Image: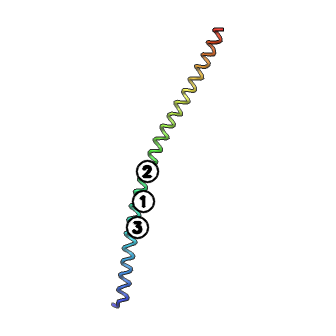
Amino acid sequence: MSDTIIVALLSALGTGAGAIVSAFVSNKVMAVKMEVVQRDVTELKEETRRHNQVIERTYKLEERTSILETRVEGLEGKKK
């Protein structure tokens, strides 16, 4: 075999190996990033759930306050 063919084969082998290693490293980095995104989404879901509970409790408190205000106004009307 001529020297040119040997150099071409070694270059192709080096390029292929580099591409394969690069793909594996990129895949690992993407997997780590996906884990971070999954964790962030899970945390956001929990925060949203807690926020919605606060909204529900606030709505119930406003409802009860309205009822109590009506009752107080009725009592004040009887008192006069």
| Residue shown at the point (59%, 21%) measured from the top left | 67
Residue hosting label 2: 38
| Residue shown at the point (40%, 56%) measured from the top left | 32
Q: Residue furthest bottom?
A: 2
| Residue shown at the point (54%, 27%) measured from the top left | 60
Disc 3 to disc 2: CB gap under 8 Å: no
- Give whichever of discs 1 and 2 has the lower sequence position: 1
- Give whichever of discs 3 and 2 has the lower sequence position: 3
Categorize mark 2 by other alpha carbons within 10 Å: few (<14), some (14-19), many (20+).
Answer: few
- Mark number, residue 30: 1
Disc 1 to disc 2: CB gap under 8 Å: no
* Distance in Å between CA atoms under marks 3 and 1: 10 Å
**As displayed, is residue 79 above or below residue 55?**
above
**As displayed, is residue 12 above or below residue 28?**
below
- Give whichever of discs 3 and 1 has the lower sequence position: 3
* Distance in Å between CA atoms under marks 1 and 2: 12 Å
x and y percentages locating residue 63 in the rendered image: 57, 25
